Image: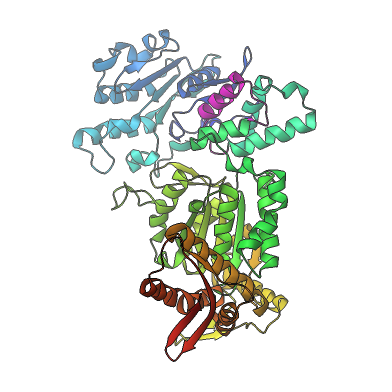
Amino acid sequence: MIKNPRWREEIDTYRSIKSAFVIEGNISDLQMYASADFGLELTSLDEYLYVFLLGEGYLNITFYNRVDGFYNHLDPQQTADFGMLADVETGGDGVSIATACKAVRTAVRQTGKSVAVIMNMASLMTAGPDRMDDKEIENFATLLLATQEAVKAPSRDGSWINNMIFLVVEKANDLPAWIYLNNPYVKVVEINKPEREMRAELIAAHRSEFRDADRLDAEELEKMENRLVGITEGFTYMELDRVLTLCGEKRLSMGEAPRAINAYRYGQQDDPWSRLGKEQLIGISDALCKDVKGQPTAVNAVADVIKRSAAGLSGLQHSSGRPKGVLFFAGPTGTGKTEMAKSMARYIFGDESTLIRFDMSEYGHEHSDQRLLGAPPGYVGYDAGGELTNAVRQHPFSILLFDEIEKAHPTILDKFLQILDDGRMTDSKGQTVYFTETIIIFTSNKGIYRTLRDGTKVPLVSPEDPYPVIEKKVNDAVRDFFVSDLGRPEILNRIGNNLVVFDFIRKESVPQILQKQLSNIISGLKDNNGIEVVIRPDSDAFRALTGWSIENLSFGGRGIGNVVEKYLLNPLGRVMTDEGWERGSCHEIRNIVQQGESVVLVSS
C-alpha cells in the first residue's frame, strides 16, 4: 500500500477542525493512489479529491469553475442532488461567480446532507488580489463568511462531518490574503512534486516494461531503480509516467533508461558522459598534464573526480540528483586554475565553449542573485531570465566556473546550497533548471595574501615555501572564510574533500610551460598565416625566454605569457611585417637579444 502524499495527510489531520482548504502548488499534475481493483493508479486532482471525499462519507460532492459553472463529470447525479445548489442552474454562463459564492455559502450552512465544494481555478475569480474591484471583494467576502459559518451535516454512515470548501490555485497569494491569513477556519496545503518514495513506487510499477528487468537479480534491480529515482528528482507524476511508458514502448533496458530520461529533461539524445570510455578515463591524468604543467597533485585530484563522475558515483551517499562533480580550486594566481577548467571541458565535452565562466567580483551587491537567477515578476529584466539559469538551460552538459567566489554576495552563496544539494534551481519564472550533468568549480585566492585596511596586500605564503605548507595554509584560510567570516560551514560541507590547492609555478616547470605556449604560437602561425617558425628547445632563444620567465615567476603562468608577448610576439610581428615573410616560408629563431629598449630576433 503506497503512502498518502503529505498534502493529503494534512487534510486528514485538519478536516475535523477546518471548514476550508486552499490547495496550491503542483495542482495540474496527476495524482497517485492505490486502487483495490487496479492497484496503483494515476488520476486527475479532481478524481483524487472525489474518491477521497466519497470515502470520507460526503453525500454531495461538486466542482465549480467560472467557465463550466457547477459540475461533476465523475458522477453527474451529484450536482442535481446538491441540496441548496439544486435550485442553481448548472453549466457555463448560467452560474456567475457572484451567484456561485452565494450558493456555496448557503450550502455549507445547511444540515440536510454533508457537502464538499471544490472551486477550481479560484485565482481566476479576480484580476489580482492587489487590484480587486468592489464586486470581486464582495465575492470573496461571501466565501470568507462561508468558511466561518459552515456547519456539520450527516455523512453516509450517519456520523456528522464538516461541510467543506476547497479553493484550488497555483499559488495561495493569487487569492486575497485576508481569506486565509489569521483565519482559523482555513488551512493552506501545498501539493509538491512527487517525493522519492512516491517516485520509487511508480518506477516499480513500470518494472515489467523494461527489457531486462526479469533477468536482473534483486540487488542489481534495486540499484538500477534507485538510480532512476535519483535522476528523476523534480519530475511530475505525468512526466515520469510518460517517460517510463516511452521506455517500455521502445523496450529499453534499465541501464538505457537514464539516457531516455536525460533526452526528455534536456531535449537532446546525446550524453557526452557516456562517450568517456575506459581508455580515456585511464589516460585522463596524462591528458590534463599536457595542458596544466607543474600541478601533479591538482591533476590527480581532478582526474579522480572525473572518473567518479563518469562512473555515476558522485553523490550516491547523499542523492544522485547532485551535480556530477564539485571542485574548489584555491592557490596563487596564474598557476593553472582556469586552464585546468578549460582542459576538463575539452576532454569531457569535446569543446572548450562548454566552459561557462562567471566572474563573481561582478556579483558582490545585495541583489546580484537576480542577475544569476532572474528578476522577480514586475521588475526590470524579468523577461530576460537569469544569466546562470539561461546558460545551464541552453548547455545542460557543461562546466561552470565561478571565479573568486569569496567576492560574491552572501545571498548568492545561499543559492548554491540548493544547487549543490539537489542539483536543481527554480528560476524567477518558476521553471526548474537542472545542474545534474554539470561540474561546478569555484576558485579563490584565499590564503595567499591578507589585505590590510589601507589596501596593502601582505603575502601569507611564498614560492620558497614547500607545497605541504602552502596546502595547509590555504586549506585553513578557506575553512576560516566559510566558518568564521561567513558563518556558513554548511557550504564548506557541500564541497567536502574536493578542495584542490594549486602550487606556485616552480623553476623546473618553466621550460614545460614555455614550450606549450610556443607550440600554440607556432601552430597558430602555420594554420593562419602559412608560415613555419622553428624555436629549438636547445637554442639560445629558448634559453633566453626561459631566463626571463624565471625572473617573472611571481606572476605565475601569466608572467611567462607576458614574457613571450614582450620578447617574442612583439618583435616577431615587427620582423614579419618589415621583412615581408610570405606564406610557405620557413624561419628558425636562433636567439633573442635585448639591445637597450629594443628586442632583436636572430633568425635564419
- In the rendered image, residue 447 lying in the magenta stretch gets the answer no
Q: Position of residue 298 (x, y in %)?
A: 66, 65
Residue located 45% across and 64% down the image: 359
The figure's colour scheme reads rainbow
Residue located 45% across and 12% down the image: 74
- Depth order, front residue of 599/289: 599
Q: Residue furthest bottom?
A: 596
Q: Compared with residue 573, is residue 21 higher up or lower down, i.e. above or below? A: above
One can see residue 142 in this view: no
Left or right of 398: which side holds 497?
A: right
Quadrant where the N terminus lies? top right
Q: Compared with residue 480, is residue 262 higher up or lower down, i.e. above or below? A: above
- Depth order, front residue of 265/279: 279
Residues shaded magenta: 233-256
Residue located 40% across and 30% down the image: 168
- Depth order, front residue of 349/12: 349
Asked where in the image residue 147 lies, by quadrant, the reply is top left
